Image (cartoon, rainbow, N blue to C red):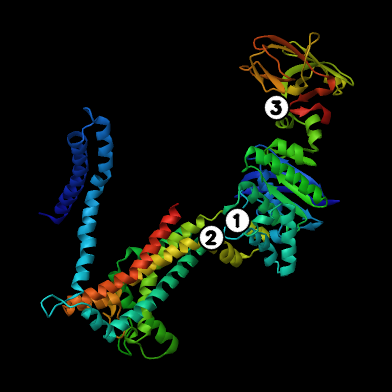
Amino acid sequence: MHPAILGLVTIAIGVGGCVGYFYLSNMVLDHVIFPARGPNAGKNINRANQIRPWLFLFPALFALCLYLAYPVVETLRLSLTDRDADGAFVGLANYTQMMSEAKFWEAMRNNMLWLIVVPALSTAFGLLAAQLTDRIRWGNLAKSLIFMPMAISFVGAAVIWKLVYDARPAGTDQIGILNAVYIWMTGAEPQTWLTLPFWNSFFLMAVLVWIQTGFAMVILSAALRGIPEETVEAAIVDGAGPMQIFFKIKVPQIKSTIMVVWTTITLVVLKVFDIVFAMTNGQWETQVLANYMYDKLFRSNDWGVGSAAAMVIMLLVLPILIWNVRNARQEMR
Amino acid sequence: MTQLKLSDVGKTYGGSVEVLKDINLDIDTGELIVFVGPSGCGKSTLLRMIAGLEQISSGQLEIDGQLVNDVPPAQRGIAMVFQSYALYPHMTVRENMAFALKLANKGKAEIDAAITRAAKMLQLEPYLDRLPKALSGGQRQRVAIGRSIVRDPKVFLFDEPLSNLDAALRVATRIEIAQLKEQMPDRTMIYVTHDQVEAMTLASRIVVLANKGIAQVGTPLELYERPNSEFVAQFIGSPAMNLMPGEVIATGTQTRVRLEGGGEALSDYPTTDSDMGLKVNVGVRPEDFIETDEAMLFEGQVDITEKLGEVTLLYFNRTEDDPVIAKLPGVHRGMRGQAVRLTAAPDKIHLFASGQSLLYR
């Protein structure tokens, strides 16, 4: 069958199945299990109403358990077993082994660097872009352009930026824009940017900043629009200049949104994998936790240590995630 | 002494949409000027132009003899109280009031003194360390006023400051503003409202705005007793002044008009011989009608009565072009459906020809 037709059939079955499930299960509940007639009609209606939410939630809960909760438990179990001993329970041996590896600490250190730099720069650039594009005629066009990288997959972005950082032997024409500019400005030899330890991590971070700035800008732009115009006018009458209005009136009023944007980007950063995988694969001291996990799990085939790395990532993400969800809920109130 | 002078001031949006034109107005030091007008008449725009939040499209604005068209708001010596209070939500009451002073690089002692004085004046002392969201509407309004007081401006601008308060609080705050004005007799205030009770009670002079310009300027009672046009006559006073068409039949220091409804009215408005036969509208305020058995100005059957206790409103000709309302003091029972004859004293009868008062020709 043609793949397009296959896709359409799949969609039809999926959507039809969902509608069918909700419709039929609701009907069975109302007419067969607790019919709204007979001596217990009122009681049955109440009972049916108590059960109905769970009935409708069941597919989602089932999928969540199967694809989220179970894998977490299974990963935890795997992280406590050993592949050489045929899956025997080894306690925290995998964790100890991981802690003794220099590559793990390199990944930890890099992750922390990413954690500081990327959210800070993305939020700062996003805020700047949001403020500068606010209320100007071509602001929406500028915003669309800045937002566009959001539509590119991380791997796609990595490929684009690999070309930016590309290096050709000295004397030949450079196709990497960074080297072209570098040579034009300094006249020095072309650099293989991605192999320069320490700095290369920042070249990788630039890719994620480039992507996440658009996200930060859109959210912060909406928040800026939400600031009551009269508070800004009051500040003008009070004698505040543009900078003071921005930093003392506007930014404090959208502080909670800034925090949400910051933490949301932090979550993305903690899980960063594709960019490092596609650009350096963790060589030249650019390793990060997610790529380290992938290395262990799928290249070394060491599910024990790989799972342990996954658990570490989860532990790091969890507190920020909880804070973020709480904050978002407060926003909604 | 003239403190604020507007000469031929106009406002045009986008080069073609004219909202105000040829505004000429002199405001003296210590006055409390109220801008009133129907919604969309540009009264807030005019205030914002004085504040410097809107560009003045044409004409000149002078404050204390200095042209301020292009002077930034903070340097005009004005302070503004906004309709929505516009308190900075992330600052405490104290910080809200201190903000402008800090920007002006005032010393800490001076700032504290100004805040203490304003807080005392407005009974805000217990709330100085609260955030605006922990205050009631009336308290927020007082903070907004306090924020303008601490700057010690020459001119206070109020943009419908009471419209977000409930009725009882509105009355209380109105009185507070009046008292505040008394404590600062040398400070000028300009106050925008659409509420004519606020205008009548607060103003030293009222500016009625309509049709992109000033309809009339005067003290509240001048506007009430001697409106210069049908518009002002009907805008000031509630229920609005009745207008009844008629024809001048006798002229002189007093004018006699025969009404189309059959009655006759004698007005203190003077006319000349050339006015003989002039088509006029006779204006009588509902509260100026008196019941009579003799020569009457108006006779009609009461359609509906509204008994408010202190007064009774009688509605006549409700479905016709020229409905008439009379406001009689006290309670009147069983008036509905009855024929009533009404008249009014000559000094209470206003005459208008083509919309303009005969007094101001």
Q: Give the label, 3 or 2, closer to the camera.
A: 2
State if disc 1 and disc 2 touch (CB < 8 Å): yes
Q: Quadrant of residue B103?
A: bottom right
Whole-percent x, y for residue B19 in the image: 65, 44
Q: Residues within 10 Å of mark 2 (few under 14, many from 20)?
A: many
- Label 3 SS: loop
Q: Amino acid at mark 2?
A: Gln
Q: Amino acid at mark 1?
A: Thr
Q: Residue at x 25, y 79 (%)?
A: A95
Q: Residue at x 39, y 70 (%)?
A: A210
- Label 1 SS: helix
Q: Amino acid at mark 3?
A: Ala
User: Which residue was labeled with disc 2?
Assistant: A253
Q: What mark, if any, has residue B240 been given in the picture?
A: 3
Q: Are marks 2 and 1 on the same chain?
A: yes
User: Which residue was labeled with disc 1?
Assistant: A231
